Image (cartoon, grey):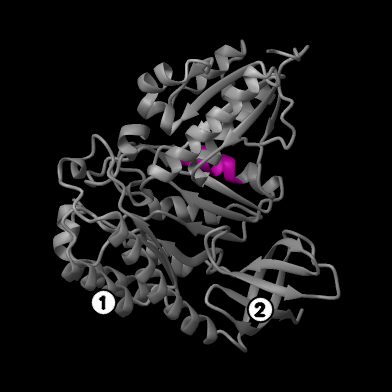
Amino acid sequence: MKTKKHKHTNVNIVTLGCSKNLVDSEVLLTQLRGNGIDAVHESKDDNSSVVIINTCGFIDNAKQESIDTILRYVDAKEEGIVDKVYVTGCLSQRYKDDLEKEIPQVDAWFGTRDLSRLLKVFKADYKHELVGERILTNPSHFAYLKISEGCDRPCSFCAIPLMRGKHISRPMEELVLEAKNLAKSGTKELLLIAQDSTYYGLDIYKKRNLAELLNRLADVEGIDWIRLHYAFPTGFPLDALDVMASRPNICNYIDIPLQHGSTRMLQLMRRGTTREKTEELLQTIREKVPGIAIRTTMIAGHPGETEQEFDEMMNFIEKSRFDRLGVFAYSHEENTHSYSMADDVPDEIKRERVDAVMELQQGISLELNQEKIGKIYKVLIDRKEGGEFIGRTEFDSPEVDNEVIIASSEYLRIGDFVTVRVTDATEFDLTGDVIS
């Protein structure tokens, strides 16, 4: 029974999933406020008249979290706490027809490219003059910059093209304008994201244009760090490494999802490469950008993965000594090429393999971190926790990588750079003292 009716429209945007979803929510927030609508991101109070849930549909756990969140707000609607519930994002794009039948209490469903249609619900228009502007939901000293949308890669396990569509690069001028606006608002670090950042420019410039984009962004005054994420290894534009090596404000860091270390599994995954070519690329990256930190992701338990191929992946990880590594248990996703194969690795074995990969990586991370003891690094302060300040080096991306823990009697301002000498190290964190 409804117990409450709101007198005016105020909107709460709830974001699930990856940083690309977060950027979409920030653009939506900017457009709503630009139309004079009272909108917030992830309000701690469940008192908004309208809730928009930006969902993730990547793998099983993410899908379940999205569904649970939708049901939570549907219950809030039934109790009269909120008036309207709208759902957008990847899960909505992928399963809209089924979800409409299963959860009819949701007022409307929108896909990943339905921003204009979603705004019309609020009698709002898409304001082109706001292109390049964004209200940030994270601390303003760093910001994600989405350089493209969608993906043209044929990876057998991945449902992202089903949810995000074909690759569309954003024009360079638009990205530079957004970077300048962010810098004026106090942003010091840009995190470049896309479904496939190395494909950037092929559609609109007829060539891989990541190198030029990096150069143009590095010219933006006030941007101290630029960090490259989600660089697909096949067809990697090597000239981007030359720019990275020559421009001091481009971090010696790359996130390059490799997914496996067995040539046979890479072929089954339709990755367009082999282990040998991957190892050559890693060697080239390290030669062109000495001291670079390489982050990657792996998938354990893909259909057809035998113990031998898993051992090959473990050997590849041990040999490659990645600075950062994440691993997923394979998720059997409908309408992908891998879905036509038998999901023949039991869940228990998948979990065991994930644990084995992480145990191996923990040992590598500990060794690499302990080598940093006594060395001096430039650290960006992210937050304060209790009596300690938490920051990152250029080799670490927020939320997924190492952090530097600093005990300081003096206050360190969030978003400032400080110079830190490392005094101790664990598998995933450094401890240090400020020296200037």
Q: Main secondary structure of the magenta part?
A: helix
Decide if residue 89 is in sight here.
yes
Residue 347's tag is none
- Around disc 2, counting alpha carbons within 10 Å, would you say few (fewer than 14), some (14 to 19), or many (20 or more)? some
User: Between 27 and 360, which is closer to the camera in this rendering?
Assistant: 360
User: Between 256 and 43, which is closer to the camera in this rendering?
Assistant: 43
The magenta span reads 172-179
Label 1: element kind: helix
Residue 356 is situated, as x and y percent measured from the top left of the image, at 35, 71
User: Between 36 and 53, which is closer to the camera in this rendering?
Assistant: 53
> In the image, is residue 432 above or below residue 52?
below
Three-letter code for the amino acid on which mark 1 is drawn = Asn
> In the image, is residue 161 above or below residue 266?
above
Which residue is the site of mark 2?
Answer: 431
Count of marks placed on residues: 2
Query: How far is mark 1 from mark 2, CA to CA?
Result: 30 Å
| Relative horizontal placement of residue 135, taking residue 201 as reference (left or right) | right
Residue 315's tag is 1
**Location of residue 328 by image quarter:** bottom left
Residue that appears at 66% across and 70% down: 379
